[in-house]
Amino acid sequence: MSFLLSLDGPSTGQRFPLGAVVLLGGPAAGAIPVPGAEVSVEIRHAGRRYVATATESFRVNDSETKEHALRTGDVIALAGKRFLFRNEDTSTVERRAPHLGALYRVAAVLTGGQDFPAALGTALSVLLEETAARRAAAWLSSDDGGKLERAAACARSSDAPALLDASYPTLPALQLAVVARGSSSGPLLVLPLAVRTHALGALVLEGPEPDGLPERDVELLTAMSLIAAVAAENSRNARQMEEYGRLLMSIEKATMWLSGYLERDPILGEAVGFARSIFKASHVSIAEIEPGGKSARIVRAVNPRKTDPTQYHITVGEGMCGRVLATGKPLLSPDPVTGQPPGGYDRSKRFKTDSFAIVPIFASASEGADLLGAINVADKIGGRPFNERDLELLAVLARAVGVALHNARLYERATVDSLTRLFVRQHFFYKLEVLLAAALKTRRPLSLAIADLDDFKKVNDTHGHPAGDAVLRAVGDAVKKSVRPADFPARYGGEEFAVIFPGATLAEARAVCLSVLEAVRSAEVDGGAGGKIRISASIGLAELRSGDTPESLIARADAAQYRAKYGGKNRLVEADK
C-alpha cells in the first residue's frame, strides 16, 4: 500500500492512495488538492518505485528538484503544504499491524503514571504474549549509574522461574544490543535502554531453543526498548527533580535556622547536623582557618569512628581539605568525568573514604570575600558516591554557613570584650533590661552580682599594664568556667565584672559567686621579675524585688560590693533584702 499523508492544514492526517499516475496539486480534475498550487506534480508508478516529476521546481526533503525517485519517508512540499510518502507492501503491513497494537499497549502502560518498575513488569507481560520469548527481565542502572539493579521479571509459565542470571554485561558494554548465552538454557537477547549516549539499563529476554527469537520479535522488542528507554529517562528525571526539590527545601530550612543564630557554637552544630541529614553523609566536618591563614583546625565534626577529628590541624595547601583552603575551589571524589579520586589523594593517610565533597566557606557571596574555612561530607550512607548535584547543593549550604559565621563574628565584636571574652558593658545593660522585665512578668527569681578586683591598680603600677591585661584575661576565664550556661557574665568596667543570674534565687546565686571567688583566688598570673601575681575580688550580690528597676537592682548590688571591699576584701556580701 502506497499513499501520501497530509502533514498540514485542514487535511492533516488524511491519506491519499497512489495508483499508476496521480497528480498532486494544480487545476486538473481528480488531482490531490493543494490550495495555491498552480502546477501539478505528477507521481507515476514505475516498476517497483514511484517517481515525482513537474515542469517547475518543487521541494523534496527541503531540496528543490523537478524529478525525484521517491522513497518511504520522503516529504514533498508544494505551495507551502507538505505530504509524507509511504510505500509498504502487504506483507509488511500485515506483519506490523499486531506490532503496532502491542506497542500502543506498552506505551500506554509505561506512560500511564504507574510506579515505573511495576509498569515495566506489566510491559514485559505484554511482550511475552506477543513474542516467542520464554522469560524476560528489565534491569535499570542505579541513580548514580554505578550498577544494574533488576527492576522487573516475568516468565511464560509458572514452572519457569522469572529470575534471569545476574551476570550480564555492565552498562559500558550496553551501548549496542548484544546476544549472549547466560547460565540459563535458552539464547538471550540483551537490548540496551539508552537515550542518546546515556545507558539507563537493559531488557533481557530468553528465546526458545535452538534458534532464539525470530526476526519479527526482535524488531518488536527493539521498538519496545526505545519506548522503555524514553520512559525510564522520564521516570528518572521526575524522581531526581522530586529529590532535588526536597533537598532545596531542606537547604532553605537550614538557611533559615542558621540565620537565626548569632553565636558561633550553635551555628557549627546546626551546620554539621543539616549536612549529615541532607546529604546522608556518614562523616561531616567543618574546618576553620586559624589566624595567620597558614593552618586550619577541625572545629566541629560528626564522625562514627572512635577517633576525634577535632584534634587534627590542617596545613593550607596540603591534603584534599588543605587544597580547597588554598585554592578556594570545591573538590569532588570520585571525579564525575574520570571516576577516579582527585590527583594527590592518598587513601592510606588519616581518613580513608570512598567518596567525599569539600566546599570552601566564604564570609559572603561577594567576590573577594574572606575565606573562613571549608565543609566536608564523606561516605554516603548506602554507599553511593557524591555527585555534581550534591556539590552544588553543598555550596549553597556553605554560603549560608559562611554568612551566619560572619554575622556571628560581627555580633561578637560588638558584644564581647576582646580581652576578657565576656560581654561588654553596653550589651550587659540591654540584657539586664530584657531579663529583668521577663522575670517581673513571670514572677521568676533573678539575681545580680557585681565584682571588683582587689588592689588592681597595684598590679599595673608594680608589674606593668601587660601584666594587668593578663590578670583581666585570667579573671575572665575564671568567671566563664564558674557560671552556669544560662548566666550572663560581663565586663562591667575597667576591673569590674557583673553576672546576671536568670531564674536564680539569692541562695542559688550565692553558690555560684562563691565558686567564682575560689576560681579567682586560684588563678595565678606570671608577673615577670615581680613574681607570681595573686588575685582576689570583692563581690556584691542582690536579688530582684517586685519594685526593682535595672538601676535600683544595680545600685543594691553595687552597695553590697562596696561593703565587701571596705569590709576586708576577698569576700561576698549580700544586699539587704
Image (cartoon, grey):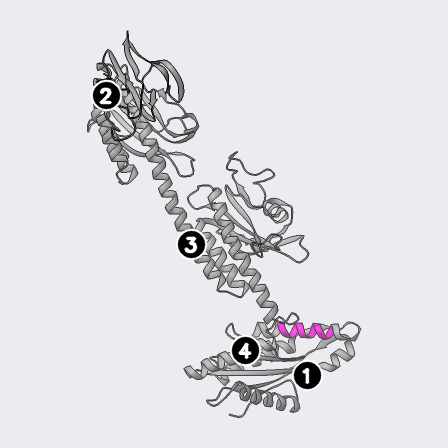
In three-dimensional space, the C-alpha distance between marks 2 and 4, rounded to whole angstroms, equals 89 Å
Q: Amino acid at mark 2?
A: Phe
The residue wearing badge 1 is 454
The residue positioned 50% from the left and 51% from the top of the image is 396
- Which comes before the other along the chain, label 2 or label 4? 2
In three-dimensional space, the C-alpha distance between marks 2 and 3, rounded to whole angstroms, equals 59 Å
- Which comes before the other along the chain, label 1 or label 4? 4
Q: Amino acid at mark 4?
A: Tyr
Mark 2 vs mark 3, foreground winner is 2
Quadrant position of the N terminus in the picture: top left
In three-dimensional space, the C-alpha distance between marks 1 and 2, rounded to whole angstroms, equals 111 Å
Which element type, helix, strand or loop, lies under badge 2?
strand
Q: Amino acid at mark 1?
A: Asp
Magenta stretch, residue numbers: 467-476
Examine the residues drawn in magenta and state their main secondary structure.
Answer: helix
The residue wearing badge 2 is 16
Mark 2 vs mark 4, foreground winner is 2
- Left or right, 6 with reference to 443: left
Which element type, helix, strand or loop, lies under badge 4?
helix
The residue positioned 75% from the left and 78% from the top of the image is 460
In three-dimensional space, the C-alpha distance between marks 4 and 3, rounded to whole angstroms, equals 35 Å
Mark 1 Cα shell of 10 Å, populated few (<14), some (14-19), many (≥20): some
Mark 1 vs mark 2, foreground winner is 2
The residue wearing badge 3 is 250
The residue positioned 38% from the left and 29% from the top of the image is 194
Mark 3 vs mark 1, foreground winner is 3
Magenta span includes 140: no
The residue wearing badge 4 is 430
Which element type, helix, strand or loop, lies under badge 3?
helix
